[in-house]
Image (cartoon, helix red, strand yellow):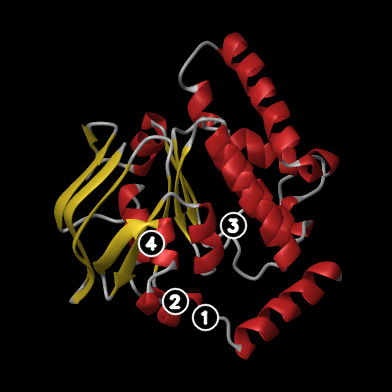
């Protein structure tokens, strides 16, 4: 479904991706793990057309998309859930979701599409029940976990075949994260393919089929999720939970409970 060949991306003189090659097959969950600054977000932005590759090729479902604008990439069936959620804070939940369906309105006649969009709304509310309860509420007043659900549901309203998620668990309480990862598995069960960038490498690999490790803009390791979970170097670099991480998780949980 998605194939990158020798992709290079630079910000001025700084090279962010160096000859990156990877693939994501239909129906898979593939995780990208690596330290901050490794190039994970840049890779997703490049696929989505938000960042231009200086060299190499990005193909989606057999089409060359390396130079396409973001709206064309979305229309082809590739949606990005960005880091930081980026919901429209002053608009209600329902309106945020309808904005995600913009590509649907451009595909067909209004009456037919409206019925399809309403069906998609019901599907999103079944996947994320709290969004239905808060559909008239301004998005900016939602909790962090609810905003992440909204960002994911908004992306799904475009009916993508590939969903790319950038750090969906960042800053969220463990119980909320657990629900989000269940939702990611449900998205795959409904037929979508998932490319996941996630700071919680252990949780990401537990639901993934395969994974890639990025370091300094390069793919340094790839394999099945099981193999990466059992790899000593991966365990030491990315899967260990120290006290600072535990304290951060506890602080996030307290914050979520008081919102």
Of mark 2 and mark 1, the one earlier in the sequence is 2
Q: Quadrant of the N terminus?
A: top left
Q: Is 127 situated left or right of 212 in this image?
A: right
Q: Residue at x 50, y 56 (%)?
A: 82
Q: Residue at x 31, y 54 (%)?
A: 46
Structural distance between the alpha carbons of marks 4 and 1: 16 Å
Instruction: State if disc 3 and disc 1 touch (CB < 8 Å).
Output: no
Of mark 1 and mark 3, the one earlier in the sequence is 3
Q: Is residue 8 above or below residue 233?
A: above
Near mark 1 (Cα within 10 A), the count class, few <14, some 14-19 or many ≥20, is few
Residue that protrudes farthest toward the bottom in the picture: 243
Of mark 4 and mark 1, the one earlier in the sequence is 4
As drawn, the label of residue 240 is 1
Structural distance between the alpha carbons of marks 2 and 1: 6 Å
Q: Is residue 17 above or below residue 70?
A: below
Pair 4/1: label in front: 4
- Disc 4 element: helix
Structural distance between the alpha carbons of marks 4 and 3: 31 Å
Pair 4/3: label in front: 4
Q: Which residue is mark 4?
A: 227
As drawn, the label of residue 235 is 2
């Amino acid at each position: 479904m998605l194939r990158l060949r020798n992709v290079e991306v630079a910000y001025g003189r700084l090279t962010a991706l160096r000859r990156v090659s990877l693939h994501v097959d239909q129906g898979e969950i593939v995780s990208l793990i690596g330290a901050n600054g490794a190039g994970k977000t840049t890779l997703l932005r490049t696929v989505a057309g938000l960042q231009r590759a200086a060299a190499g090729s990005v193909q989606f479902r057999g089409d060359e998309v390396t130079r396409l604008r973001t709206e064309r990439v979305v229309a082809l069936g590739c949606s990005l859930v960005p880091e930081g959620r980026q919901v429209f804070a002053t608009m209600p939940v329902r309106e945020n979701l309808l904005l995600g369906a913009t590509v649907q309105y451009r595909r067909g006649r209004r009456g037919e599409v409206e019925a399809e969009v309403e069906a998609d709304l019901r599907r999103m509310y079944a996947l994320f029940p709290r969004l239905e309860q808060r559909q008239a509420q301004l998005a900016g007043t939602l909790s962090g976990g609810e905003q992440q659900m909204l960002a994911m549901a908004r992306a799904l309203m475009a009916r993508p075949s590939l969903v790319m998620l950038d750090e969906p668990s960042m800053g969220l309480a463990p119980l909320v994260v657990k629900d989000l990862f269940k939702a990611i598995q449900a998205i795959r069960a409904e037929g979508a393919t998932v490319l996941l960038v996630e700071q919680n490498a252990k949780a990401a690999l537990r639901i993934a089929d395969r994974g890639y490790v990025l370091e300094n803009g390069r793919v340094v390791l790839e394999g099945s999720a099981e193999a990466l979970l059992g790899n000593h170097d991966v365990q030491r670099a990315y899967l260990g939970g120290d006290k600072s991480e535990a304290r951060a998780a506890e602080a996030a949980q307290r914050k979520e409970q008081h919102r």
